[in-house]
């Protein structure tokens, strides 16, 4: 099987989106932009041995590769539309490719995003997805809009993926739910779209709550105070913290792909209705302040969020 046969068999499927004029199979893709909208784009690379282990299933690798990009688009308050896939493979493994392709296609259908091109090559296993989205002019959420007095919020629960990774690193067996949170995160697509009318700033929690919230604060030239006991965490992680008094996992663990955002006080009541309509828990964990920097109440132990280098 050569490169072109591989693409035709595993990464070419019908595109239902009428805005795609030309998809997989040419030198480049063509798609039409709606008038009054801006293009939003993001890229993430997942590498074996860094972002997933050699034992991770092809199904989970495909899911996470697409989900982390969807999460970035959601954090901008945008609608994901198209993506390209660049994949390096050490060899042609038809069963692995079929599982990867089936998972990618299923999640693409669920979130109504179209694969429109990419590249394949031989090498150590890694997957790069570039996602394109659309947002009305001047309506995108950014990291720069937080203001003193805004509440600091997070979606879902924080620290599950980090706790799973901690267990694996220490020879312990994670629960199925913890493995799912690490390998198959749920991008908060619907919430991100709804927040563009409520939030003043937003980011997805990929490298750790402390670090990602600090990006908002630095870009917005503000500070914040958060309380560790207000961070929503699972019962299992809470038990670990009660035994160790170590809040570093929910603060620094990363890979949650929940949204962290700030909301002006006059919009907090509307936020409760939004939580119900999107069927996702939203928790206030602190407040934005004029004093620069992030103050964390309830834990003064060592904290080290993920760094790529």
Image: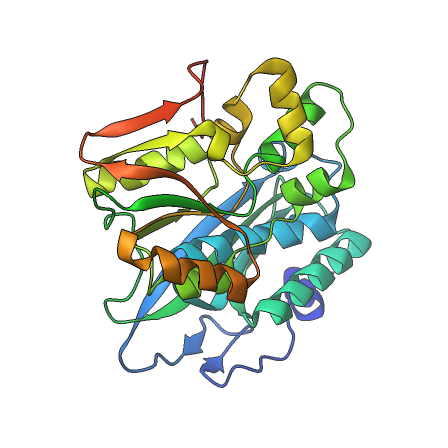
Relative image position of residue 86 (x, y in whole percent): 54, 55
Q: Is residue 91 above or below residue 214?
A: below
Residue that sits furthest to the bottom in the current view: 18
Image quadrant containing the N terminus: bottom right
In the image, residue 302 sits, relative to residue 123, either above or below, namely: above
* Total residue callouts: 0
Q: Residue at x 35, y 79 (%)?
A: 33
Please state which of residues 79 and 100 is positioned toward the viewer in this rendering.
Answer: 79
Question: What percent of the width, then of the height, locates residue 139?
Answer: 28, 66
Residue 198, percent from left and from top = 33, 61
Single out the residue that lies furthest toward the right: 95
The answer to whether residue 225 is seen in the rendering is yes
Most foreground residue, 211 or 277: 277
Q: How is the image coloured?
A: rainbow
Quarter of the picture holding the C terminus: top left
Does residue 131 show up?
Answer: no
Name the residue at 62% across, 32% down. Answer: 49
Residue drawn at point x = 71 percent, y = 68 percent = 9
Residue 154 located left or right of residue 163? left
Q: Residue at x 50, y 64 (%)?
A: 190
Residue 91 place in picture, x, y as percent: 72, 46
Q: Quadrant of residue 115?
A: bottom right
């Amino acid at each position: 099987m050569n490169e072109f046969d591989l693409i035709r068999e595993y990464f070419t499927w019908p595109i239902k989106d009428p805005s795609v004029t030309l998809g997989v199979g040419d030198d480049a893709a063509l798609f039409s932009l709606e008038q009054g909208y801006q293009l939003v784009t993001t890229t993430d690379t997942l590498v074996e041995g860094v972002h997933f282990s050699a034992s991770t299933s092809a199904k989970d690798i495909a899911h996470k590769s697409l989900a982390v990009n969807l999460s970035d688009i959601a954090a901008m308050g945008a609608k994901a539309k198209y993506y390209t896939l660049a994949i390096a493979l050490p060899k042609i493994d038809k069963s692995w490719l079929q599982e990867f392709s089936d998972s990618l296609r299923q999640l693409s259908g669920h979130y109504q995003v179209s694969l429109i091109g990419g590249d394949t090559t031989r090498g150590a296993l890694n997957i790069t997805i570039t996602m394109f989205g659309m947002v009305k002019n001047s309506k995108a959420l950014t990291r720069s809009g937080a203001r003193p007095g805004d509440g600091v919020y997070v979606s879902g629960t924080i620290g599950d993926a980090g706790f799973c990774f901690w267990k694996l690193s220490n020879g312990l067996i994670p629960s199925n739910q913890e493995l799912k949170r690490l390998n198959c995160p749920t991008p908060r697509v619907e919430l991100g779209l709804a927040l563009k009318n409520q939030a003043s700033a937003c980011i997805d929690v990929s490298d750790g709550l402390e670090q990602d919230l600090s990006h908002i604060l630095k870009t917005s030239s503000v500070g914040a105070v958060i309380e560790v006991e207000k961070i929503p965490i699972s019962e299992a992680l809470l038990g670990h913290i009660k035994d160790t008094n170590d809040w570093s996992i929910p603060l620094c663990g990363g890979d949650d792909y929940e949204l962290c955002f700030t909301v002006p006080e006059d919009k907090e009541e509307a936020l409760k209705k939004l939580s119900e309509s999107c069927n996702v828990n939203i928790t206030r964990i602190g407040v934005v302040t004029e004093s620069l920097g992030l103050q964390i109440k309830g834990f003064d132990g060592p904290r080290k969020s993920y760094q790529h280098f």
